[in-house]
Amino acid sequence: MSETRTSHSAGLRRKRDSDRAAIRAALDELRKRTGVPLVAGGYVGENKTLHVCEAHGLSTLQDIDVEVAPGVGVGGRIVATGKPFGVTEYLRSGVISHEFDELVRTEGVRSVAAIPAIVGDSVRAVLYVAMRTNVRFGEKSLAEMTAVGRRLEQHLAVADALEGNNAGRGLGARAARGSLSAGVGGSLGGAAHAEGDTAVPEFDAALVHERMRETHAKLRVLSSRTEDPLTRMELESIAADLVAPSSQVSAAKLARRELDVLACVAQGKTNIETGQIMGIGAETVKSYLRSAMRKLDAHTRYEAVNAARRIGALP
């Protein structure tokens, strides 16, 4: 019994350390891609407590180690809802609790935005960007955050698969962690050079899944451009085959063009870029996006993408 508890504790420590390393790499990439000087992140542990343990750009602290309960502050709200969230004028905001005002005031933070990294049905990590000025983060910055968050999700999912496979085969986690380090060093998206043969298929699966999402978006756009109705139906059918079936899709009643727009948004495209791809104006893109958000009961474009994935409308 004692050996079982020790083994379980060791497994939790390995998972925590692996998650922290992945979050650290994600923050490096996030800072480079957004240009935001202050970024932070943490993993979700037992009882859905968020442990904010990594940060870049702090002016008063060498390290950060903050525990955030579900529903508390920006991060706790994200853990509780699984949805991106942000505030301007943090200290004056009436939509969050203020347990961490002292830290925020000391760092001079005014604007905060954060996103979840979701694996399966659970929030596994939260990534923050913050500014010491009163700004509303633009669409481009949020798109970059989403792209980094998606890679972090893939990395965590692959890490889980490797840990489970190696535990089941009695191989231990050392080889898995060694193979994962290649992915972390490559900004969460690089090719994995596995120490053991068992690591390669899981990494390949993550890359294939990402390519599948890209292919799905391209098929949706291509079908919207063709004038032949039979060809359009065939392309849409192929795209649908890439998505897990769900009875909820029909309930959402998403229109074809709404799905096309969501597929582009899922790739991190702006409204202007989506309009250029689809051959329509940015305002028309906004109209389709608003309609899809209303049907999916989403408040932001990224909530809409996540909701569409949950009902099986997007891969």
Image: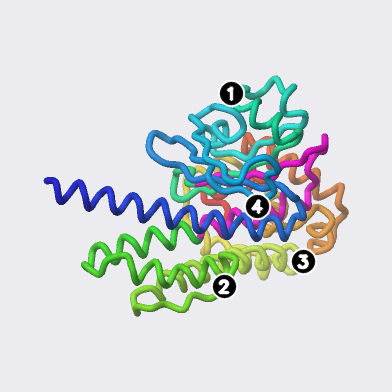
Q: Is residue 313 magenta?
A: no
Q: Residues within 10 Å of mark 2 (few under 14, many from 20)?
A: few
Amino acid beneath label 2: Gly
Mark identifier at residue 46? none
Label located before the other in sequence (1 or 2)? 1
**Residue indicated by mark 4:** 146
Location of residue 51 with respect to 91 vertically, above or below:
below
**Residue indicated by mark 3:** 225
* Screen quadrant of the C terminus: bottom right
Mark identifier at residue 99? 1
Q: Element under label 1?
A: loop
In whole angstroms, how far apart are the C-alphas of marks 1 and 4? 27 Å
Q: Residue at x 25, y 70 (%)?
A: 171
Picture coordinates of residue 250, whole percent (x, y): 55, 44
Picture coordinates of residue 263, whole percent (x, y): 66, 57
Q: Element under label 3?
A: helix
